[in-house]
Image (tube, coloured by chain):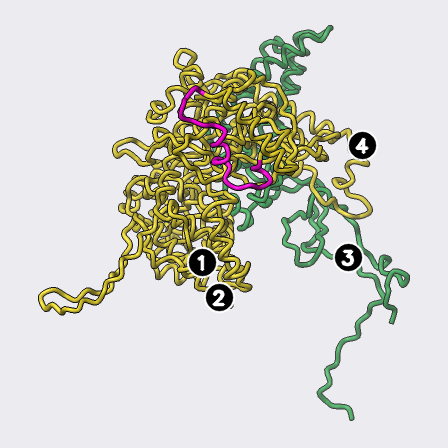
Amino acid sequence: MSRSTTIKLPVLNLAEPPKHHIRARGRSNSIVKVEHVGDRVEEVLDRNAYINRNADWVNAKGAWLIHLVLIICGKICLDTIPGMTHNISWTLVNLLYLAISYLMFHWVTGMPFGDNLHSGAYDELTMWEQIDDGAQYTPAKKWLICMPIALFLASTHYTNYNPWLFAINLTALLFVLIPKLPQLHRQRVRFMADETASGMATPTTPSFSSGISTPLVEITQADFTESQLKYTH
Amino acid sequence: MALSKPSTPSMFKKKSGTSLSAMASAASYLSALSQADARARGQSNGSPTSTPALSISSSITSSSQDTVLHEEEDYADGLVLPARPPTSEQVFNTVHTEFGHCAQEEYRLTSKHTPGEPVPGHVDADPPYYILFSTYISYLILIVLGHIRDFLGKRFHAASYHHLIPRNGYAPLNSDFDSFYTRRLKTRMDECFSQPVTGVAGRTIVLLDRMSPDYNHTQLFTGTRTRALNISSYNYLGFAQARGGCADAVEDSIKRYGVSTCGSRLEGGASDLHANTEALVAKFVGMEDALICSMGFATNSTYIPALVGKGCLVISDELNHASIRFGVRISGASVRMFKHNDMNSLESLLREVISQGQPKTHRPWKKILLLVEGLYSMEGTLLNLPKIIELKKKYKFYLYVDEAHSIGAMGPHGRGVADYFGINPRHIDILMGTFTKSFGAAGGYIAGDKVIIDHLRVHGHSGPYAEAMTPPVLTQIIASMASIMGVKPPAPAVSSGHSLRLTSPAPSVQEESYVHPGPVPHSALPTWLNLPPELASGEEGATRLRRLAFNSRYLHNGLIKLGFITYGHPASPIVPLLLFNPGKMNMFHRMMKDRQTPIIIVVVAYPATPLITSRVRFCVSAAHTKEDIDTVLRTCDEVGDVLDLKHGLPRSERWPIDEITSKAVELAHMMK
């Protein structure tokens, strides 16, 4: 006999493919967005527990002068190339120094040794953000800001204030100086970010990427064909 | 006084591999003995009373595979036989390859802090600028080359990068950026690391030689073995012995208790031996009670969460060990770090955290625990315990001292840093230590007030989940601790007097009490334990302590006088020697190993050390003789000249090596 207390469930329609991918947050409409990284509680605790050998060397002896030594060596090496005028050589020294220091301090994130002491607490921080545990206006950061400015001034002087070269050098300098500002500490500028998260409960930063090398595969209804499913009931 | 070698040692002479085969027959043994006699007489120092041939057998106490004379083995490396043949009066009961024979009373020193002498904080040594620049440029070249090779290799030689590239929809197992240092820098030097060894890691150790056909990606055994002087194992008091009183006691205990108690401490694995050992450890360090954990790392990582939790603050030194860091992370307490061994930085940090309180709410902290180590293993610096006790009285925090390296190695009675400075250990709240380094055992202990230890027994993770310490290791701990402390002989049985005197009290049972630091009463040890007399009297233990103190000071001051830069306190048995350049590490290791007396060393590099200060770490032991330290000093002298490592003392103040070896006693008494 049927009981009046049977629960009536709404009809579930599994035939249609889901309209949207699984998403943790709604899609944003802006092309460029700036977001904050590296603030999870566990990461903060892990960072405090041990010293950061990856970023400690900027305060060691000789770490400041090595910039000068490398620039001078680079200038000498560039000058030996036949056909090099002093305009091009100074511009090249400036651009190369800015490119290499940008790559080293502001592009690469994390630590190049995967020891368990830090367990990924620095994986999203660039070396600039790791220096001095993120403190601002420290002597090492001041030196690292002054070096490109001094090199820029020297290069504009020695290229006789040629307007084109000046413009190139200035743009490059600004490009490198902006990430060093304290206001951009731990901010990332994302361009046309994709918002797909891997699962509903994955803790994510606003623009999720589980890892740089995770292949982004979209899973749709077509993946669950009869031939792929073992149990057809 | 140094070993008179038959030929001048060439730096690059490779020691031919010796195979340890058994003796063919008694006749060959006797012929080898007579040959060794003739050789020794030819080299004797001319002392009429020494009879070298007969004394050879006394220096090798028992016949076993690595002590019986071999026909084909040459003794030119000076490792198997003592350099100075013993006289007829001297009797040594250790094997020379495990624990060196040394009867010179002048090569002994008491490890004690002279009051008034300042405890040096960590001093950063300053090499000349060209060394620093070349170090930075080497790392830059290695990193740039590594990145170029990765970049090109992934595109043109993808077969060898399978594990680093996503394929077939699978993410790579290892991140190529995280493993960059291991693949591109460490693999170049990999012959220095993970050296397989065999036999007792005592004064000497037997290496299994290996070679690599493909630039250190795979290592293949060549089949030969090399016996090398072992200045890299943690063996401070030389208890790493396969033969001796402790080893015999351990064999007895296996017959009695078996190899395991088959359970965790709180679930049936406890035994009387555990209680006995814990009581002995508590007496040894001078605290009320102690508990033992079967793993040294786990002692910190499982018991620190039982001490601190959320709302507590842990102040830890910058260079604390990974086990402490692990335990603090699990506990959920907040952490602050102060500069290594810098008391001013500690005081300003204390003022800041006490005044500010908890991070957001600014409420006072539930507990503030200062976690420091007695002796830091990477730097060799000693804790400034007097100043910390002073700060403790002023700011009233709790103190936890991790004496993993300093227990058994420092102090006139071997009781650790508190003994070294002459401070009552009850002023420290919790003393932790390990048995691995000085006692030839394994595991760790925590000692403190009975209330705290009872709480830790129940609330620490090891109690219910980890296995109980195994009986043979417990016996090794008991035997080695009793040897260091000395055993008070049992009081003679008092016969019940047949005359009752009312004026004097009846003779009561002698209460055997323990006074710290002093010998342990006989009743505290298990009754079946039979230590040989020289161990039980504490004489051998005291000799070992004094030999260790002499050896460490001698090596440290000798290296300084040779012109090297070393870190650490001169009394510490860990002596780091700075190399700076990454390329020199490999060369130094190889040059030390390829000598007539091979020496096996430990090199430590970035990221375990700061970027520019890569180092060699010597671990001195009581098992070394003065001649062994001379060998190390001589080798360092030659290798340091070739590799340009002497940036310490200026050339005018350095001493030549012969002067150092002849003035050893004076050098050891020098306060740096």
Mark 1, residue position: B306
Compared across the picture, whether B218 is left or right of B58 comes to: right
Q: Which chain is yellow?
A: B
**What amino acid is found at the position of numbered circle 1 in the picture?**
Ala
Type of amino acid under label 2: Leu
Q: Residue furthest front?
A: B27
Which chain has been coloured green in this picture?
A: A
Q: Is residue B62 magenta?
A: yes
Q: Residue at x 52, y 43 (%)?
A: A47
Is the same chain shared between marks 2 and 4? Answer: yes
* x, y percent for residue B78: 53, 27
Q: Which mark is residue A20?
A: 3
Q: Amino acid at mark 3?
A: His
Q: Which residues are magenta?
A: B45-68
Q: Earlier in the sequence, mark 1 or mark 4?
A: 4
Residue furthest left as drawn: B503
* Residue where numbered disc 2 is placed: B266
Mark 1 vs mark 2: in front = 2
The amino acid type of the residue labelled 4 equals Arg
Q: Is residue B128 left or right of residue A113?
A: left
Chain of residue at mark 1 = B
Q: Residues within 10 Å of mark 2 (few under 14, many from 20)?
A: some
